[in-house]
Amino acid sequence: MSRYLFVVPPFFGHLSPTLSVGAGLIARGHQVAWLGIVPVQQEHLPDGGVFIVPEKELEPCREQVAAILKRQDDGPSLSGPEVMRLALEETYIPIARIMMPGLERVIDEWQPDVIVNDCIAFAGALAAYKKGIPCVTTTPVPPDVMGDTANQAPKVYAWQQQLIRDLQYGVGIEEEGIFVHSHKMNIVFTSAAFAGFTDPEPHMHFVGPVQGRPNHAPFDWERLSRVTTPKVFVSLGTLLVDIRKEFFTRLVEAFRDEPLTIIAATDPAVIDAWPDNFIVQGFVPQSELMPHMDAVICHGGFNTVNDTFMNGLPMLITPIAYDHFHTAALIEKAGCGLKIRYKRMRVPDVREAVWRLLREPQFRQAALQVRDTFIAAGGSAKAISLLENFTAETMSKPAMIHD
Amino acid sequence: MDTVTTGNQAAATAIFDLLKQFITEVIGEEFVEEMDIQPSSSFTRDLEMDSIEIVAFSEKVKAHFGEHIDFTGWLSGMDLDQLINLNLNDIINYISVCR
Protein backbone atom coordinates (compact mmCIF):
# COMPACT_ATOMS: atom_id res chain seq x y z
CA MET A 1 0.00 0.00 0.00
CA SER A 2 1.42 3.36 -1.05
CA ARG A 3 0.55 7.02 -0.70
CA TYR A 4 -0.01 9.06 -3.88
CA LEU A 5 -0.40 12.83 -3.97
CA PHE A 6 -1.83 14.25 -7.21
CA VAL A 7 -1.01 17.92 -7.78
CA VAL A 8 -3.57 19.50 -10.12
CA PRO A 9 -4.33 22.89 -11.71
CA PRO A 10 -7.75 24.55 -11.32
CA PHE A 11 -9.02 23.21 -14.67
CA PHE A 12 -11.42 20.28 -14.75
CA GLY A 13 -10.05 18.86 -18.01
CA HIS A 14 -6.68 18.32 -16.34
CA LEU A 15 -8.15 17.09 -13.04
CA SER A 16 -10.59 14.65 -14.67
CA PRO A 17 -8.22 11.84 -15.80
CA THR A 18 -6.40 11.96 -12.44
CA LEU A 19 -9.75 11.30 -10.73
CA SER A 20 -10.10 8.13 -12.82
CA VAL A 21 -6.55 6.94 -12.11
CA GLY A 22 -6.92 7.90 -8.44
CA ALA A 23 -10.20 5.97 -8.17
CA GLY A 24 -8.39 2.89 -9.51
CA LEU A 25 -5.53 3.29 -7.04
CA ILE A 26 -7.97 3.61 -4.12
CA ALA A 27 -9.78 0.46 -5.28
CA ARG A 28 -6.43 -1.36 -5.07
CA GLY A 29 -5.93 -0.28 -1.47
CA HIS A 30 -3.65 2.75 -1.91
CA GLN A 31 -4.10 6.07 -0.19
CA VAL A 32 -4.73 8.94 -2.56
CA ALA A 33 -4.93 12.70 -2.04
CA TRP A 34 -5.21 15.60 -4.46
CA LEU A 35 -3.83 19.08 -3.93
CA GLY A 36 -5.19 22.08 -5.80
CA ILE A 37 -5.84 25.78 -5.31
CA VAL A 38 -9.60 25.65 -5.94
CA PRO A 39 -11.85 23.14 -4.11
CA VAL A 40 -13.53 20.41 -6.15
CA GLN A 41 -17.18 19.44 -5.71
CA GLN A 42 -17.35 16.37 -3.52
CA GLU A 43 -19.46 14.42 -6.04
CA HIS A 44 -16.48 14.31 -8.46
CA LEU A 45 -14.15 12.79 -5.89
CA PRO A 46 -13.86 9.00 -5.66
CA ASP A 47 -14.91 7.51 -2.30
CA GLY A 48 -11.91 7.38 0.01
CA GLY A 49 -10.08 10.19 -1.79
CA VAL A 50 -9.12 13.50 -0.15
CA PHE A 51 -8.87 16.84 -1.93
CA ILE A 52 -6.64 19.29 -0.07
CA VAL A 53 -6.68 23.06 -0.63
CA PRO A 54 -4.00 24.72 1.52
CA GLU A 55 -6.23 27.64 2.52
CA LYS A 56 -3.81 29.23 5.00
CA GLU A 57 -1.03 29.75 2.45
CA LEU A 58 -3.51 30.70 -0.29
CA GLU A 59 -5.15 33.41 1.82
CA PRO A 60 -2.91 36.27 0.57
CA CYS A 61 -3.34 35.10 -3.07
CA ARG A 62 -7.15 34.96 -3.34
CA GLU A 63 -7.46 37.96 -5.65
CA GLN A 64 -4.60 36.77 -7.83
CA VAL A 65 -6.18 33.31 -8.19
CA ALA A 66 -9.54 34.87 -9.12
CA ALA A 67 -7.82 37.10 -11.69
CA ILE A 68 -6.00 34.13 -13.26
CA LEU A 69 -9.24 32.16 -13.58
CA LYS A 70 -11.10 35.14 -15.06
CA ARG A 71 -8.27 35.77 -17.50
CA GLN A 72 -8.92 32.37 -19.11
CA ASP A 73 -12.09 33.80 -20.66
CA ASP A 74 -9.87 36.00 -22.85
CA GLY A 75 -8.36 32.92 -24.56
CA PRO A 76 -10.86 32.77 -27.45
CA SER A 77 -10.21 36.40 -28.48
CA LEU A 78 -6.41 36.10 -28.41
CA SER A 79 -4.02 35.07 -31.17
CA GLY A 80 -1.79 31.98 -31.01
CA PRO A 81 1.34 33.73 -29.71
CA GLU A 82 -0.75 35.71 -27.23
CA VAL A 83 -2.30 32.51 -25.92
CA MET A 84 1.20 31.09 -25.46
CA ARG A 85 1.97 34.04 -23.19
CA LEU A 86 -1.39 33.73 -21.42
CA ALA A 87 -0.78 30.04 -20.75
CA LEU A 88 2.82 30.04 -19.58
CA GLU A 89 3.52 33.52 -18.23
CA GLU A 90 0.08 34.43 -16.88
CA THR A 91 -1.24 31.03 -15.79
CA TYR A 92 1.15 28.08 -15.25
CA ILE A 93 4.05 30.02 -13.73
CA PRO A 94 2.03 32.16 -11.28
CA ILE A 95 -0.06 29.13 -10.26
CA ALA A 96 3.15 27.25 -9.47
CA ARG A 97 4.41 30.14 -7.33
CA ILE A 98 1.06 30.38 -5.53
CA MET A 99 0.89 26.62 -4.91
CA MET A 100 4.41 26.07 -3.69
CA PRO A 101 4.29 27.12 0.01
CA GLY A 102 1.07 25.25 0.84
CA LEU A 103 2.14 22.25 -1.21
CA GLU A 104 5.48 21.96 0.61
CA ARG A 105 3.74 22.01 3.98
CA VAL A 106 1.16 19.39 2.90
CA ILE A 107 3.93 17.14 1.57
CA ASP A 108 5.73 17.33 4.92
CA GLU A 109 2.53 16.49 6.79
CA TRP A 110 1.02 13.91 4.45
CA GLN A 111 4.30 12.17 3.49
CA PRO A 112 3.45 10.85 0.00
CA ASP A 113 5.53 8.03 -1.46
CA VAL A 114 5.01 9.40 -4.96
CA ILE A 115 3.95 12.82 -6.23
CA VAL A 116 1.94 12.82 -9.46
CA ASN A 117 1.86 16.25 -11.07
CA ASP A 118 -0.32 17.27 -13.97
CA CYS A 119 1.81 18.62 -16.83
CA ILE A 120 0.80 22.24 -16.18
CA ALA A 121 0.91 21.97 -12.37
CA PHE A 122 4.65 22.65 -12.29
CA ALA A 123 4.74 23.02 -8.49
CA GLY A 124 4.23 19.27 -8.01
CA ALA A 125 7.40 18.29 -9.85
CA LEU A 126 9.39 21.20 -8.35
CA ALA A 127 8.41 20.29 -4.78
CA ALA A 128 9.16 16.62 -5.45
CA TYR A 129 12.60 17.58 -6.76
CA LYS A 130 13.35 19.76 -3.74
CA LYS A 131 12.30 17.08 -1.27
CA GLY A 132 13.73 14.06 -3.09
CA ILE A 133 10.35 12.38 -3.55
CA PRO A 134 9.79 10.25 -6.69
CA CYS A 135 7.61 12.04 -9.21
CA VAL A 136 5.44 11.03 -12.16
CA THR A 137 3.82 13.51 -14.56
CA THR A 138 0.39 13.06 -16.14
CA THR A 139 -0.38 14.65 -19.52
CA PRO A 140 -4.04 14.74 -20.59
CA VAL A 141 -3.38 16.24 -24.05
CA PRO A 142 -1.13 15.15 -26.92
CA PRO A 143 2.33 16.46 -25.96
CA ASP A 144 4.19 19.08 -27.97
CA VAL A 145 1.23 21.42 -28.34
CA MET A 146 3.52 24.43 -28.48
CA GLY A 147 5.43 22.89 -31.36
CA ASP A 148 9.15 22.52 -31.83
CA THR A 149 10.06 26.01 -30.61
CA ALA A 150 13.70 25.04 -29.92
CA ASN A 151 14.33 24.70 -33.66
CA GLN A 152 11.56 26.69 -35.29
CA ALA A 153 11.39 29.73 -33.00
CA PRO A 154 14.59 29.96 -30.93
CA LYS A 155 13.67 33.31 -29.37
CA VAL A 156 10.32 31.96 -28.23
CA TYR A 157 12.09 28.87 -26.86
CA ALA A 158 14.57 31.04 -24.97
CA TRP A 159 11.67 33.00 -23.47
CA GLN A 160 9.99 29.74 -22.30
CA GLN A 161 13.22 28.44 -20.79
CA GLN A 162 13.96 31.72 -19.00
CA LEU A 163 10.50 31.87 -17.44
CA ILE A 164 10.89 28.33 -16.10
CA ARG A 165 14.41 28.97 -14.81
CA ASP A 166 13.24 32.13 -13.03
CA LEU A 167 10.40 30.14 -11.45
CA GLN A 168 12.80 27.40 -10.31
CA TYR A 169 15.25 29.92 -8.89
CA GLY A 170 12.40 31.68 -7.08
CA VAL A 171 11.34 28.48 -5.30
CA GLY A 172 14.88 27.64 -4.28
CA ILE A 173 16.18 25.39 -7.07
CA GLU A 174 19.51 26.65 -8.37
CA GLU A 175 20.73 23.59 -10.28
CA GLU A 176 20.89 23.68 -14.08
CA GLY A 177 18.07 21.85 -15.82
CA ILE A 178 14.32 21.93 -16.22
CA PHE A 179 12.45 20.30 -13.34
CA VAL A 180 8.79 21.19 -13.96
CA HIS A 181 8.07 17.68 -15.30
CA SER A 182 9.21 14.22 -14.29
CA HIS A 183 12.13 12.91 -16.33
CA LYS A 184 11.40 9.39 -15.00
CA MET A 185 7.81 8.80 -16.05
CA ASN A 186 5.22 10.76 -17.99
CA ILE A 187 1.82 9.11 -18.43
CA VAL A 188 -0.03 10.48 -21.46
CA PHE A 189 -3.78 9.95 -21.85
CA THR A 190 -3.88 9.38 -25.58
CA SER A 191 -2.26 6.90 -27.96
CA ALA A 192 1.18 7.48 -29.48
CA ALA A 193 -0.28 6.79 -32.92
CA PHE A 194 -2.99 9.44 -32.57
CA ALA A 195 -0.57 11.99 -31.05
CA GLY A 196 1.81 11.44 -33.97
CA PHE A 197 4.71 9.93 -31.97
CA THR A 198 6.50 7.10 -33.74
CA ASP A 199 9.49 6.93 -31.43
CA PRO A 200 8.64 8.46 -28.04
CA GLU A 201 11.29 8.93 -25.36
CA PRO A 202 11.39 5.90 -23.02
CA HIS A 203 9.87 7.75 -20.05
CA MET A 204 6.79 8.72 -22.11
CA HIS A 205 4.00 6.16 -21.64
CA PHE A 206 0.91 6.57 -23.84
CA VAL A 207 -1.91 4.75 -22.03
CA GLY A 208 -4.91 6.15 -23.93
CA PRO A 209 -8.08 7.42 -22.28
CA VAL A 210 -8.71 6.45 -18.65
CA GLN A 211 -12.09 5.83 -17.09
CA GLY A 212 -13.53 5.20 -13.68
CA ARG A 213 -14.12 8.60 -12.08
CA PRO A 214 -17.54 8.99 -10.49
CA ASN A 215 -20.16 10.86 -12.53
CA HIS A 216 -23.58 10.92 -10.87
CA ALA A 217 -25.18 13.48 -13.21
CA PRO A 218 -28.81 12.52 -13.90
CA PHE A 219 -30.17 12.39 -17.44
CA ASP A 220 -33.54 12.06 -19.14
CA TRP A 221 -32.81 8.64 -20.67
CA GLU A 222 -36.49 8.10 -21.42
CA ARG A 223 -36.57 11.17 -23.70
CA LEU A 224 -33.38 10.01 -25.41
CA SER A 225 -34.88 6.58 -26.03
CA ARG A 226 -37.77 8.17 -27.98
CA VAL A 227 -35.38 9.90 -30.40
CA THR A 228 -35.52 8.37 -33.88
CA THR A 229 -33.21 10.75 -35.80
CA PRO A 230 -29.37 10.67 -35.75
CA LYS A 231 -28.00 11.93 -32.42
CA VAL A 232 -25.18 14.48 -32.29
CA PHE A 233 -23.50 15.31 -28.98
CA VAL A 234 -22.15 18.84 -28.45
CA SER A 235 -19.81 19.99 -25.72
CA LEU A 236 -17.64 23.04 -25.12
CA GLY A 237 -16.14 21.59 -21.97
CA THR A 238 -16.05 23.49 -18.70
CA LEU A 239 -14.05 26.59 -19.68
CA LEU A 240 -15.02 29.08 -22.40
CA VAL A 241 -18.09 30.52 -20.74
CA ASP A 242 -18.27 33.81 -22.64
CA ILE A 243 -18.66 32.40 -26.15
CA ARG A 244 -21.40 29.88 -25.40
CA LYS A 245 -24.32 32.06 -26.46
CA GLU A 246 -22.75 32.85 -29.84
CA PHE A 247 -21.66 29.25 -30.44
CA PHE A 248 -25.03 27.68 -29.64
CA THR A 249 -26.95 30.39 -31.48
CA ARG A 250 -25.19 29.28 -34.65
CA LEU A 251 -25.84 25.61 -33.92
CA VAL A 252 -29.54 26.31 -33.40
CA GLU A 253 -29.60 28.14 -36.71
CA ALA A 254 -27.83 25.24 -38.42
CA PHE A 255 -29.90 22.37 -37.04
CA ARG A 256 -33.31 23.58 -35.86
CA ASP A 257 -35.04 22.33 -39.03
CA GLU A 258 -32.83 19.30 -39.70
CA PRO A 259 -33.91 15.70 -39.12
CA LEU A 260 -31.40 15.08 -36.34
CA THR A 261 -31.21 15.54 -32.59
CA ILE A 262 -28.63 17.62 -30.77
CA ILE A 263 -27.68 16.62 -27.24
CA ALA A 264 -25.88 19.67 -25.83
CA ALA A 265 -23.91 19.82 -22.59
CA THR A 266 -24.30 23.47 -21.64
CA ASP A 267 -26.26 25.64 -19.25
CA PRO A 268 -29.72 25.90 -20.93
CA ALA A 269 -29.95 29.57 -19.89
CA VAL A 270 -27.58 30.67 -22.70
CA ILE A 271 -30.43 30.43 -25.23
CA ASP A 272 -33.97 31.70 -24.57
CA ALA A 273 -35.91 29.11 -26.55
CA TRP A 274 -34.31 25.84 -27.64
CA PRO A 275 -35.89 24.04 -30.63
CA ASP A 276 -37.63 20.72 -29.95
CA ASN A 277 -34.78 18.69 -31.45
CA PHE A 278 -32.28 20.00 -28.86
CA ILE A 279 -31.82 18.18 -25.54
CA VAL A 280 -29.85 20.55 -23.29
CA GLN A 281 -28.41 20.00 -19.83
CA GLY A 282 -25.60 21.67 -17.87
CA PHE A 283 -23.64 18.68 -16.61
CA VAL A 284 -24.20 15.30 -18.29
CA PRO A 285 -23.04 11.70 -17.73
CA GLN A 286 -20.85 12.06 -20.83
CA SER A 287 -19.17 8.62 -20.87
CA GLU A 288 -22.57 6.90 -20.53
CA LEU A 289 -24.14 9.10 -23.20
CA MET A 290 -21.47 8.65 -25.86
CA PRO A 291 -22.31 5.05 -26.86
CA HIS A 292 -25.81 6.29 -27.85
CA MET A 293 -24.47 9.04 -30.17
CA ASP A 294 -23.79 9.07 -33.91
CA ALA A 295 -21.38 12.04 -34.10
CA VAL A 296 -19.85 14.72 -31.87
CA ILE A 297 -19.27 18.46 -32.22
CA CYS A 298 -16.70 19.96 -29.87
CA HIS A 299 -13.96 22.61 -29.67
CA GLY A 300 -11.26 20.06 -28.97
CA GLY A 301 -11.23 19.71 -25.18
CA PHE A 302 -9.30 16.55 -24.69
CA ASN A 303 -11.66 14.60 -22.45
CA THR A 304 -14.45 14.94 -25.00
CA VAL A 305 -12.03 14.01 -27.79
CA ASN A 306 -11.09 10.87 -25.84
CA ASP A 307 -14.71 9.92 -25.10
CA THR A 308 -15.59 10.43 -28.77
CA PHE A 309 -12.93 8.17 -30.25
CA MET A 310 -13.23 5.56 -27.50
CA ASN A 311 -16.70 5.14 -28.99
CA GLY A 312 -15.48 5.25 -32.58
CA LEU A 313 -17.56 8.34 -33.44
CA PRO A 314 -16.69 10.94 -36.08
CA MET A 315 -16.14 14.51 -34.87
CA LEU A 316 -16.64 18.04 -36.12
CA ILE A 317 -13.95 19.96 -34.27
CA THR A 318 -14.28 23.74 -34.01
CA PRO A 319 -10.94 24.83 -32.53
CA ILE A 320 -11.09 28.07 -30.55
CA ALA A 321 -7.79 28.57 -28.69
CA TYR A 322 -5.08 26.82 -26.62
CA ASP A 323 -4.23 23.30 -27.80
CA HIS A 324 -7.42 22.94 -29.86
CA PHE A 325 -5.66 23.65 -33.15
CA HIS A 326 -3.06 20.98 -32.51
CA THR A 327 -5.82 18.46 -31.71
CA ALA A 328 -7.75 19.53 -34.83
CA ALA A 329 -4.67 18.88 -36.97
CA LEU A 330 -4.34 15.37 -35.44
CA ILE A 331 -8.01 14.63 -36.17
CA GLU A 332 -7.71 15.78 -39.78
CA LYS A 333 -4.57 13.68 -40.18
CA ALA A 334 -6.29 10.59 -38.78
CA GLY A 335 -9.30 11.22 -41.04
CA CYS A 336 -11.75 10.69 -38.17
CA GLY A 337 -13.40 14.09 -38.41
CA LEU A 338 -13.67 17.52 -39.99
CA LYS A 339 -12.42 20.89 -38.78
CA ILE A 340 -14.11 24.27 -38.95
CA ARG A 341 -12.29 26.94 -37.02
CA TYR A 342 -14.65 28.70 -34.58
CA LYS A 343 -13.68 32.12 -35.94
CA ARG A 344 -14.62 30.99 -39.48
CA MET A 345 -17.73 29.03 -38.54
CA ARG A 346 -20.43 29.55 -41.19
CA VAL A 347 -23.84 28.03 -40.50
CA PRO A 348 -24.18 26.22 -43.89
CA ASP A 349 -20.64 24.78 -43.53
CA VAL A 350 -21.43 23.39 -40.08
CA ARG A 351 -24.63 21.81 -41.36
CA GLU A 352 -22.88 20.26 -44.35
CA ALA A 353 -19.96 18.98 -42.27
CA VAL A 354 -22.23 17.21 -39.78
CA TRP A 355 -24.23 15.52 -42.54
CA ARG A 356 -21.01 14.39 -44.22
CA LEU A 357 -19.85 12.85 -40.93
CA LEU A 358 -23.18 11.04 -40.58
CA ARG A 359 -23.45 9.86 -44.19
CA GLU A 360 -19.90 9.13 -45.36
CA PRO A 361 -18.59 5.94 -43.74
CA GLN A 362 -14.87 6.75 -44.04
CA PHE A 363 -15.00 9.11 -41.03
CA ARG A 364 -16.48 6.49 -38.75
CA GLN A 365 -14.05 3.87 -40.05
CA ALA A 366 -11.10 6.13 -39.24
CA ALA A 367 -12.61 6.87 -35.81
CA LEU A 368 -12.84 3.13 -35.14
CA GLN A 369 -9.15 2.82 -36.01
CA VAL A 370 -8.27 5.53 -33.49
CA ARG A 371 -10.44 3.62 -31.00
CA ASP A 372 -8.34 0.50 -31.58
CA THR A 373 -5.12 2.39 -30.78
CA PHE A 374 -6.75 3.84 -27.64
CA ILE A 375 -7.86 0.43 -26.38
CA ALA A 376 -4.51 -1.18 -27.18
CA ALA A 377 -2.77 1.55 -25.12
CA GLY A 378 -4.18 -0.03 -21.96
CA GLY A 379 -6.18 2.75 -20.27
CA SER A 380 -6.68 2.96 -16.51
CA ALA A 381 -5.35 -0.53 -15.78
CA LYS A 382 -2.10 0.30 -17.59
CA ALA A 383 -1.75 3.67 -15.83
CA ILE A 384 -2.23 2.03 -12.45
CA SER A 385 0.28 -0.77 -13.07
CA LEU A 386 2.82 1.80 -14.34
CA LEU A 387 2.41 3.80 -11.13
CA GLU A 388 2.61 0.72 -8.91
CA ASN A 389 5.73 -0.57 -10.66
CA PHE A 390 7.33 2.86 -10.53
CA THR A 391 6.61 3.07 -6.80
CA ALA A 392 7.97 -0.42 -6.13
CA GLU A 393 11.17 0.35 -8.04
CA THR A 394 11.83 3.71 -6.39
CA MET A 395 11.01 2.44 -2.91
CA SER A 396 13.32 -0.56 -3.20
CA LYS A 397 16.20 1.87 -3.71
CA PRO A 398 17.50 3.98 -0.82
CA ALA A 399 16.07 7.48 -0.91
CA MET A 400 18.23 9.69 -3.02
CA ILE A 401 17.80 13.43 -3.08
CA HIS A 402 17.65 14.82 -6.63
CA ASP A 403 17.56 11.40 -8.25
CA MET B 1 11.85 45.21 -36.58
CA ASP B 2 13.53 47.28 -39.31
CA THR B 3 11.57 50.03 -40.94
CA VAL B 4 12.50 50.16 -44.58
CA THR B 5 11.46 52.99 -46.83
CA THR B 6 11.57 51.88 -50.42
CA GLY B 7 11.02 55.20 -52.10
CA ASN B 8 8.72 53.41 -54.46
CA GLN B 9 5.21 53.87 -53.17
CA ALA B 10 3.63 52.42 -56.29
CA ALA B 11 5.48 49.15 -55.82
CA ALA B 12 4.47 48.98 -52.16
CA THR B 13 0.83 49.58 -53.05
CA ALA B 14 0.96 46.87 -55.69
CA ILE B 15 2.40 44.41 -53.17
CA PHE B 16 -0.26 45.40 -50.62
CA ASP B 17 -3.07 44.74 -53.11
CA LEU B 18 -1.61 41.37 -53.95
CA LEU B 19 -1.23 40.40 -50.28
CA LYS B 20 -4.81 41.42 -49.68
CA GLN B 21 -5.87 39.11 -52.49
CA PHE B 22 -3.86 36.21 -50.98
CA ILE B 23 -5.48 36.82 -47.58
CA THR B 24 -8.92 36.79 -49.17
CA GLU B 25 -8.14 33.48 -50.86
CA VAL B 26 -6.96 31.98 -47.59
CA ILE B 27 -9.63 33.08 -45.12
CA GLY B 28 -12.60 33.54 -47.47
CA GLU B 29 -14.26 36.59 -48.98
CA GLU B 30 -17.11 36.55 -46.48
CA PHE B 31 -14.76 37.10 -43.54
CA VAL B 32 -12.62 39.65 -45.36
CA GLU B 33 -15.71 41.77 -46.07
CA GLU B 34 -16.14 42.30 -42.34
CA MET B 35 -12.56 43.51 -41.99
CA ASP B 36 -10.90 46.73 -43.02
CA ILE B 37 -7.55 45.41 -44.22
CA GLN B 38 -4.86 48.09 -43.99
CA PRO B 39 -1.06 47.95 -44.31
CA SER B 40 -1.03 48.36 -40.52
CA SER B 41 -3.33 45.34 -39.96
CA SER B 42 -1.71 42.71 -37.78
CA PHE B 43 -2.03 39.10 -38.89
CA THR B 44 -2.96 37.53 -35.62
CA ARG B 45 -4.97 40.23 -33.86
CA ASP B 46 -6.65 42.22 -36.65
CA LEU B 47 -7.02 39.50 -39.27
CA GLU B 48 -7.38 36.72 -36.65
CA MET B 49 -5.29 34.37 -38.78
CA ASP B 50 -4.14 31.16 -37.16
CA SER B 51 -0.84 29.43 -37.87
CA ILE B 52 -2.33 27.20 -40.58
CA GLU B 53 -3.76 30.22 -42.40
CA ILE B 54 -0.45 32.08 -42.09
CA VAL B 55 1.39 29.08 -43.57
CA ALA B 56 -1.12 28.94 -46.47
CA PHE B 57 -0.62 32.68 -46.98
CA SER B 58 3.18 32.37 -46.93
CA GLU B 59 2.99 29.59 -49.55
CA LYS B 60 1.14 31.99 -51.84
CA VAL B 61 3.74 34.72 -51.24
CA LYS B 62 6.51 32.27 -52.07
CA ALA B 63 4.76 30.99 -55.17
CA HIS B 64 4.41 34.54 -56.47
CA PHE B 65 7.63 36.25 -55.37
CA GLY B 66 9.97 33.32 -55.61
CA GLU B 67 11.64 30.71 -53.44
CA HIS B 68 14.31 33.17 -52.27
CA ILE B 69 11.65 34.69 -50.00
CA ASP B 70 12.49 32.66 -46.88
CA PHE B 71 9.29 33.44 -45.07
CA THR B 72 9.55 30.65 -42.51
CA GLY B 73 13.18 31.43 -41.73
CA TRP B 74 12.31 35.09 -41.31
CA LEU B 75 9.45 34.30 -38.92
CA SER B 76 11.55 31.85 -36.91
CA GLY B 77 13.94 34.65 -35.94
CA MET B 78 11.18 36.60 -34.19
CA ASP B 79 10.34 36.83 -30.52
CA LEU B 80 6.81 36.63 -29.14
CA ASP B 81 6.10 40.37 -29.33
CA GLN B 82 7.26 40.53 -32.92
CA LEU B 83 5.00 37.60 -33.82
CA ILE B 84 2.04 39.17 -32.04
CA ASN B 85 2.53 42.53 -33.76
CA LEU B 86 3.52 41.28 -37.24
CA ASN B 87 1.56 43.32 -39.79
CA LEU B 88 1.21 43.67 -43.57
CA ASN B 89 3.73 46.52 -43.69
CA ASP B 90 6.40 44.22 -42.24
CA ILE B 91 5.79 41.73 -45.05
CA ILE B 92 5.75 44.45 -47.71
CA ASN B 93 9.10 45.74 -46.44
CA TYR B 94 10.52 42.25 -46.25
CA ILE B 95 9.48 41.46 -49.83
CA SER B 96 10.87 44.80 -51.02
CA VAL B 97 14.23 44.08 -49.41
CA CYS B 98 14.41 40.54 -50.78
CA ARG B 99 13.74 41.59 -54.36
Image (spheres, coloured by chain):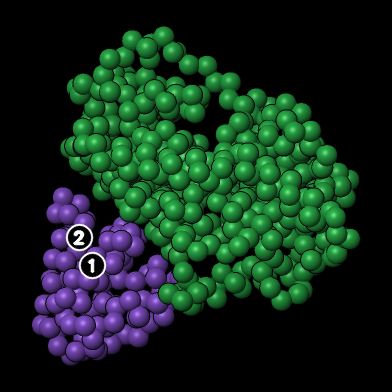
Q: Does A74 sit left or right of A352 as displayed? A: right
Identify the chain of the residue marked 2, using the numbered disc in the image.
Answer: B
Q: Are marks 1 and 2 in contact (CB under 8 Å)?
A: yes
The residue that appears at 65% across and 25% down in the rendered structure is A43
Task: Let me know if residue A183 appears in the view.
Answer: yes
The residue that appears at 14% across and 54% down in the rendered structure is B29
Residue that badge 2 annotates: B26
Residue that badge 1 annotates: B57
Please name whichever residue, A289 or B29, is drawn nearer the observer in this view of the structure. A289
Give the image quarter of residue B60. Answer: bottom left
Q: Position of residue A63 (x, y in %)?
A: 66, 46
Helix or strand or loop: what does disc 1 sit on? helix
Q: Quick one: label 2, few (<14), some, or many (20+) residues within 10 Å?
A: some
Helix or strand or loop: what does disc 2 sit on? helix
Q: Position of residue B36 (x, y in %)?
A: 20, 59
Identify the chain of the residue marked 1, using the numbered disc in the image.
Answer: B
Q: Quadrant of the C terminus of chain A?
A: bottom right
Which amino acid does the dot numbered 1 rest on? Phe
Q: Does A370 sit left or right of A16 as displayed? A: left
Please name whichever residue, A178 or B98, is drawn nearer the observer in this view of the structure. A178
Q: Chain A shown in which color?
A: green
Q: Quick one: label 1, few (<14), some, or many (20+) residues within 10 Å?
A: many
Query: Vertical placement of B96 versus A347: above or below?
Result: below
Which amino acid does the dot numbered 2 rest on? Val
Query: Vertical placement of A268 versus A316: above or below?
Result: above
Give the image quarter of residue A129. Answer: bottom right
Q: Chain B shown in which color?
A: purple
Disc 1 versus disc 2: distance between alpha carbons? 6 Å
Q: Quadrant of the N terminus of chain A?
A: top right
Q: Does A84 sit left or right of A133 as displayed? A: left
